[in-house]
Amino acid sequence: MTTKADDRPVILWFRQDLRLADNPALDHAAETGRPIVPVYILDQGSTVRPMGAASLWWLDKSLRALDAALQARGSQLILRRGYSEAELHRLIAETGADAVFINRLFEPDAFARDADIAHALQAEGIDCKGYNAALMCRPGGVLNGSGLPYRVFTPFLKALLAAAEAPTHTTGPRAIATPSGLASDDIETWGLHPTRPDWSGGFDWTPGEAGASDALSTFVGRGLKSYSVGRDIPAEPATSRLSPHLHFGEISPWRAIRAARDAASAGRAPAAEAEKFVAEIGWREFSAHLLHAFPQIADTAFRPEYDAMPWRADPAGLAAWKRGLTGYPVVDAGMRELWATGFMHNRVRMIVASFLIKHLLIDWREGEAWFRDTLVDADLASNVQNWQWVAGSGADASPYFRIFNPVTQGQKFDADGRYVRRWAPELRGVPDRWLHAPWTAPPEVLRDARVRLGLDYPRPIVDHDLARKRALEALGTVAAGRAAEGY
């Protein structure tokens, strides 16, 4: 393609910013007045950790929604797959583009890959411009008094809220001129939809920017009013369900924060509830900043002494946990919810993670890998940080000796059994008194409920008291090692 310098298009490289509103890379590309080539590259062959199957399901739907939004503005989304750098070079050669606009990724491997690509392109005279669209504040922008990253959440949140500035809300250009005739993959050929097995039939989500906006409106109108309490009750629709939309960049964190605070200002929700929600956005931010500053935590313990934990090899226990057949109803309900919907309630995530790590003494990385493959909101920073929080090995983590009792957790947060009965329907006839520990029910109660333990529903695969004792003994070996190494 031969073009005059001022007619050259610019490339807008979409990644985890699949929206048109509040998209600084798009806004700055539009300010050039040049044609824009929007492209998404399915990265293959780089060191960037690949998406799990549930995330690929979401990506398929989100890219279709983005393409429709672009077409409504006179453009289209160009789809390519392969090495990102090679595909960008190919697109530059096809279009004569001399600039690439991106919103930065801060996960360590993606950040390093993008830096290499930017240096290579700039050496060839291609301008690369990067912006922050994913976080309230770029990593490194919030440091403690010693100029180091925060390791404790509460002071981090205070500093973040003091330092971060909300950008002006933008809706994106009304019209986007894009050169015609550019080759684009058919998304059907990418095979993003799960097969063998396809478990996505129950996924009740609307990926894309419009779906994100609807989810935010629903949450602000319903769940925000009693968020601090309701978010712990898994049977209640009190959480925002924004996590996958935030991960794929279909909505900015600032828009979510602004909506919550506006609702509080208008008297539609208590200010304390809005700020509790803002703090949860801040925890997401904390996770991203930690991973960027300490990239090793994607694979190793933040507190290195915990890598000496004597984990057990227990394939049968791991399989029972994945399938929701542990014999502990709230654990099994959570794992079945995950498989059926691509999502799990936040309180239950902590319960099932604690069960895997502390009841079964299985390495937290096994759980992180399963969540990464099956969660539609699988986010490397949040996933790693939250698993290490439960394991006691992370920054500002829950102490290892805090071992959730799945029976009492179920009784406290699912007192009327609505959550368990939905996801473990074979127990629907068990009265509330025995629902979270059906093996303690009298035989006649189980008979009336048509539950045969070991047949209709499994017996517990591990005894809570014995598991707790074993976990604390394992912690003792870590503590001994920590003392010997001078930690």
Image: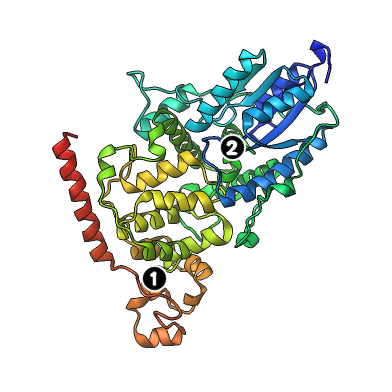
* Residue visible at 44% across and 87% down in the picture: 448
Quadrant location of the N terminus? top right
* Residue nearest the observer in this picture, 77 or 183: 183
Q: Is residue 316 left or right of residue 225?
A: left
Say which of 161 and 427 sits in front.
Answer: 427
Dot 1 or dot 2: first in sequence order is: 2
Q: Amino acid at mark 2?
A: Ala
Q: Is residue 39 above or below residue 335?
A: above
Q: Position of residue 127 (x, y in %)?
A: 66, 15
Please tell me whether residue 111 is drawn above or below residue 410 in the rendered image: above
Q: Is residue 231 visible?
A: no
Three-letter code, disc 1? Gly
Nearest to the observer: residue 431 or residue 110: 110
Q: Position of residue 370 (x, y in %)?
A: 47, 53
| Residue 327 badge | 1
Q: For marks 1 and 2, give the CA distance.
A: 38 Å
Measuring 36% from the left and 29% from the top, which residue is drawn there?
155
Local crowd size for mark 1, using a 10 Å CA cut-off: few (<14), some (14–19), many (≥20): many
The residue pinned by badge 2 equals 256
The answer to whether residue 169 is above or below residue 356 is above
Check disc 1 and report its element: helix, strand or loop: loop
Q: Is residue 410 left or right of residue 176?
A: left
Horizontal and vertical percent for residue 133? 60, 29
Label drawn at residue 437: none
The reply to whether callout 1 and callout 2 are in contact (CB within 8 Å) is no
Q: Nearer the viewer, mark 1 or mark 2?
A: 1
Q: Residue at x 61, y 24 (%)?
A: 167
Give the colouring mode of the picture: rainbow
Determine the image quadrant of residue 312: bottom left
